Amino acid sequence: MQQIDLVRHGPVAGPAALYGWTDVALRQSAPACLEWLNKQAYQQVLSSPLQRCRHSAETQAKRLGLQLVLEPDFKEMNFGRWDGVAFDEQSPEWPLQQDFWQQPFAVTPPEGESLTDFQQRLLQAFTRQSRYQNGQALWLLHGGVIRLLLAHLLHIDLRQSHWLQHLSIGYGSVSRISRYNAQSPWQIHCIAAPGFSFLQQDFS
């Protein structure tokens, strides 16, 4: 039996912006929205190498006496020139950013990564890491990473849907997936459930 909790990191210390490869810190070293993790038991802890994920993952790995697994290909999308730059409706970049929101597959951020390339590296990393994962796992990830992984598992054609625009993955939320073995299909038990409600409900 494999079970993975896909958990988004806590709030970051910065203005509203596209934070992709920018290594922005957490607003708080111990985010309140992730306190629910302290009551969970896992056999694996995996994280993006960026500190907004890694810091909380290191805390949980230490608590559980586990070695933290870092997966570079689970970094957020590279937004190029837009990465880490505060939103500004007066910026000359703003119209192209709006086009990107509406048609993310058709617009690539300047000097950044296309959504197709982002999706490909995520799915390769997911296949690689899930192959070696057994028992219950905690994966500390980014919102964009979780959206694309869920879309893949649900067989959603992102070019024909508004999944990316409308699905909110809140800070500290959990999306639980599981499968019986490597030959079984993945089952999705919850999507972006707040951690506090997760403690009160049974998604098994």
Image (cartoon, grey):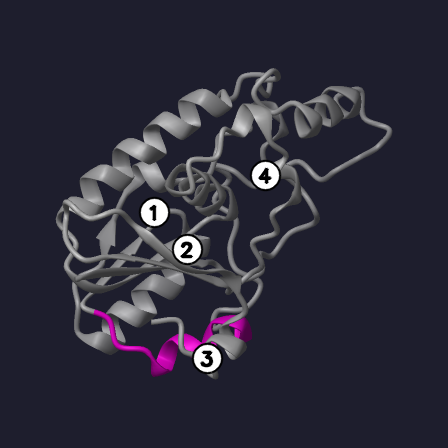
Residue pointed to by mark 1: 49
> Pointer 2 and pointer 1: residues touching (CB < 8 Å)?
yes
Lateral position of residue 186 relative to residue 198, left or right: left
Q: Is residue 8 above or below residue 99?
A: below
Q: Nearer the viewer, mark 1 or mark 3?
A: 3
Residue pointed to by mark 3: 201
Q: Amino acid at mark 4?
A: Trp
| Spatial separation of the CA atoms under disc 2 and disc 3 | 25 Å
Residue pointed to by mark 4: 163
Name the spot of residue 167 as percent of width and height, x first: 60, 47
- The magenta-colored residue range is 31-42
Name the spot of residue 141 as percent of width and height, x first: 41, 51
Q: How many marks?
A: 4
Name the residue located 53 percent from the left edge and 29 percent from the top edge. 158
Residue 105 image-quadrant placement: top right
Q: Is residue 130 above or below residue 77?
A: below
Residue 202 image-quadrant placement: bottom left
Q: Amino acid at mark 2?
A: Cys
> Pointer 4 and pointer 2: residues touching (CB < 8 Å)?
no
Name the residue located 14 percent from the left edge and 47 percent from the top edge. 182
Name the spot of residue 128 as percent of width and height, x first: 19, 39
